[in-house]
Image (cartoon, coloured by chain):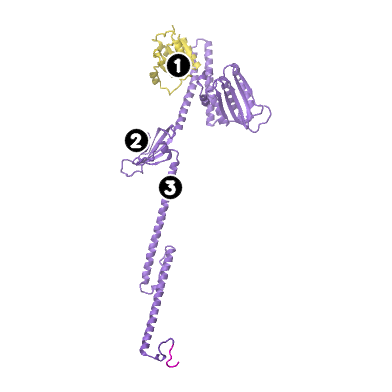
Amino acid sequence: MAKRILLCDDDVTITSAARYKLAQAGYDVQCASDGLAGWEAIQACSPDLLITDCQMPRLNGLQLIARIREVPLLAELPIFLLTGKGFELPHDELKQRFNLRAVLDKPFSPRELLKLVNQALAHEPVAPSP
Amino acid sequence: MASGARCPFWPRPMESLRFDPFTSATTLMLATTSVVLAWLMYRAQRRVQAARRYLMSVCDALDAGSPQEELLPSPELANAGDGWAHLLRRVSRTLTDHVTQAADAEAARSTLDLRCRKAIFEQERMAAIIASIPEPIVAIDAYDEVVIANRSAEELLQLDGRAAGSRALENITRCERLITLFGETRKRRLHGIRSEPIELENAQGERRWYNVTISTLAADRPNPNDRRGGGMVAVLRDISDQRELQRQHAEFVSSASHEMKAPLSGIKAYVELLADAPDEATRESFLEVINAQSDRLQRLVENLLNIARIEAGVVRVSKQSQGLNELLSEAANVIQPSADAKQIALRYEPSPLYLSVLVDRDMMLQAAINLLSNAVKYTAEGGSVILRSRLNDDQVIFEVEDTGVGLSKEDCAKIFNKFYRVDKDKNMAPGTGLGLALAKSIVEEVHGGRLSVSSTLGVGSKFTVILPLAGRGNNSTP
């Protein structure tokens, strides 16, 4: 069974590019257009990995991650943070604070993203279906 | 006269008036003595009068001012050879010396008095200048006692001037940070000027940032050998607005970079996907995305540049008197296809009057298009957008009213800020967050008009542009 990835970004171009690349590699890719939709999708589809943008309507990326980390079952969910913000967000501090697998600056490379996703999910068991 | 007769003035008989040698000699001697005495008295009186006249002339001369040359006694006194002239000249010289000294002392006193008045005036003027300076200023002496504090300093630092017995800084203020800064400057024997930003609560209870500049006063030392150092002056400058501007600038740069990174990310990602695309159709679709994202980036850069040009005052403006209705009609035509695509009824209700406005046609057209485009974007399918114009006294008004999602009071206050987009509405339509900011700059900064918004959440919004009427409008229909 294909591992499930949830893409959360309010920019359709970004989600469509990442979705295409990851789907081509055989992943089951779900998309959400803002933080709140992402939170609902996590509960609905139990992804194996979350890739989220930082600046989003309704619930931003960091708020979404904080909410996820409050749930014991989701404490170890692999999360990638995509960010268009530059100097404001120190990557190491963010990774440590929110237990993130990667922080990627925009513009990002879909190939690099796929490589990181493959590495992150290589040893992850497939999440149970909802 | 008969013998025995008596003279009524002479008691003795006339017969007794016979020549007596003894009596005659005595009488002569007496007469001579009398004459000599009278002459001597006359001379003495003449000298006294001469002396008096001399002293009077000396006094008159002194009254008239210090005489340049010594006055000499009259020859009568000078030739007398009895010491009067010498005595009088001595008296005259002594008097002249005393009067001259008194005049010098008076002049010195007047000069001193003038200097004192000048010093007092200078001190009062300096105190008035320091008091009038809006920046808080506080000066302390070598013993950390406050010697000068203007009203602003008293208010900000809550200086308690009535603190009993002491003017020591630490006793009359609760501003620990300032006390520490003065202490550090003294302890490290720092000379010259040092500055540091500190946060303080002002008299209104607001927390604001101040740049404290402490200058050491090398001359203000009670003892040059005292290692303690001299007095210090602290000037506190409110830098809250400057910090806020810096914050806004940093936020603007952050927002601009974020907004530019979005299309750039799309382009970069799709260029990479393009290289790996399996077939021509996929490549075509990817190229379309790249093209659309390039257009988006171009629009963003152009809008940013337009706003920057207007704000910097370097935009080339070509204002001409023209009819507003025609211009608005053109803007409506540009937006009509977008409205049709969403089945939005775009109605244009122009004023029946010819509304003459002095505007840069391209810029005002851009502002009208931005307002209409914004209304169409945030109005749901089947809604309506009305564009109307009217004359109000000497002002021309045009409005864009929609039945869209509306704005909260908080959003209304921020909707013209650069890059501000209402979070919940972001998914309704793409946008740069610069369209309304640009429209406002065009209307207000370029044309001296006014652009405002009134809105009810869930009901709709109305954007109103007010422009001054150019010349006199006539009643002809457009």
Count up the numbered dots. Answer: 3
- Give the residue pinned by disc 2: B184
Residue A86 percent location from the top left of the image:
44, 22
Amino acid on which disc 2 is placed: Glu
Could you tell me the amino acid type at mark 1?
Thr
Instruction: Residue at 39%, 64% (x, y): give it.
Output: B96
Q: Do the residues labelled 2 and 3 touch (CB within 8 Å)?
A: no
> Chain B takes which shade in the image?
purple
Quadrant position of residue B132: top left
* Residue A67 in view in this figure: yes
First to last magenta residue range: B1-7
Would you say the residues marked 1 and 2 are in contact, meaning their CB atoms lie under 8 Å apart? no
Crowd tier of the residue under label 2, counting other residues whose Cα lies within 10 Å: few below 14, some 14–19, many 20 or above: few
Q: Please say whether residue B136 is visible from this viewpoint.
A: no
Residue B269 placed where, x, y %? 48, 16
Disc 1 and disc 3 on one polypeptide chain: no
Local secondary structure at mark 3: helix
Categorize mark 3 by other alpha carbons within 10 Å: few (<14), some (14-19), many (20+): few
Using a 10 Å C-alpha cutoff, classify the residue at mark 1 as few (fewer than 14 neighbours), some (14 to 19) or many (20 or more).
many
Q: Distance between the residues labelled 1 and 3?
A: 69 Å
Q: Position of residue A15 (x, y in %)?
A: 48, 15
Q: Name the residue under label 3.
A: B122
Residue under circle 1? A52
Q: Which residue is drawn at 41% across and 92% down?
A: B15
Chain A display color? yellow
Establish if B139 lies above or below B26: above
Name above or below for residue B289 compared with residue B59.
Answer: above
The answer to which of B75 and B170 lies nearer the viewer is B170
Residue most extreme to the top: A1
Vertical relation: B227 (above or below) B4: above
Q: Nearer the viewer, residue B161 or B312?
A: B161
